[in-house]
């Protein structure tokens, strides 16, 4: 349906908005798809889910080669209640990379996920221009950053946005499903 609508739209602003909505819906539907593929309707493996989100966004933004490093220290499983907000967070972060951080063939990002049995920490960094100014999470003007912040809160967690040789996102929240 999104593709049919996109075919008839001439406005670049509307096209961009529809692409963003399409990627968010795709991220949410991917949770269900991954659960049905494994016949496990309670939890989803984070590594497969994350790779699929990155691949889907690469296709959406027309990037065949995505230079990235993915470090997931354990085989993490997320409940559906965790997987949807985490997927939307990852979708927003990687979308921001394609929109703002991916400027040339030297562009790259790193996404690491680590945990103990109680918390999960997601740290993303890229070598793009970073954030224009220091970001106060209580005064966000960007819809995507507001969404990341709100979803982190929904997970009873926190998020920070920093610039260290590029954009850095740090999200932390308590785990409901224990590490395998």
Image (tube, rainbow, N blue to C red):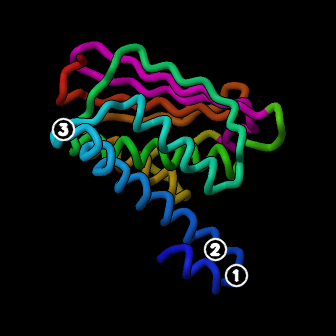
Within 10 Å of disc 2 (Cα), the crowding (few <14, some 14-19, many 20+) is some
Q: Residue at x 39, y 24 (%)?
A: 121
Q: Residue at x 25, y 46 (%)?
A: 36
Query: Is residue 97 depicted above or below 146 in this figure?
Result: above
Of residues 75 and 83, which is closer to you in this image?
75
Q: Are marks 1 and 2 in contact (CB under 8 Å)?
A: yes
Circle 3 SS class? loop
Q: Residue at x 80, y 43 (%)?
A: 103
Side of 21 relative to 121 (left or right):
right
First reached walking from the N terminus: tag 3 or tag 2: 2
Circle 2 SS class? helix
The residue that disc 3 covers is 40
The quadrant holding residue 125 is top right
Q: Position of residue 120 (x, y in %)?
A: 33, 24
Q: Are marks 3 and 1 in contact (CB under 8 Å)?
A: no
The quadrant holding residue 171 is top left
Q: Which residues are magenta?
A: 107-133
Discs 3/1, front = 3
Q: Residue at x 68, y 52 (%)?
A: 99
Side of 113 relative to 75 (left or right):
right
Circle 1 SS class? loop
The residue that disc 2 covers is 15
Q: Position of residue 1 (x, y in %)?
A: 47, 77
The residue that disc 1 covers is 11
């Amino acid at each position: 349906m999104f593709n049919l609508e996109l075919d008839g739209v001439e406005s670049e602003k509307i096209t961009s908005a529809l692409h963003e909505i399409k990627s968010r819906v795709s991220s949410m539907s991917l949770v269900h798809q991954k659960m049905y593929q494994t016949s496990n309707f309670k939890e989803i493996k984070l590594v497969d889910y994350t790779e699929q989100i990155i691949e889907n966004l690469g296709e959406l933004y027309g990037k065949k080669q995505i230079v990235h490093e993915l470090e997931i220290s354990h085989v993490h499983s997320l409940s559906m209640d965790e997987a949807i907000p985490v997927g939307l967070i990852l979708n927003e972060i990687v979308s921001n990379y394609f929109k703002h951080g991916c400027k040339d063939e030297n562009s790259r990002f790193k996404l690491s996920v680590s945990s103990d049995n109680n918390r999960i920490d997601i740290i993303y960094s890229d070598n793009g221009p970073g954030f224009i100014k220091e970001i106060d999470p209580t005064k966000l003007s960007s819809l995507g950053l507001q969404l990341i912040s709100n979803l982190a809160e929904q997970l009873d967690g926190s998020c920070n946005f920093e610039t260290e040789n590029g954009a850095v996102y740090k999200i932390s929240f308590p785990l409901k499903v224990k590490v395998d």
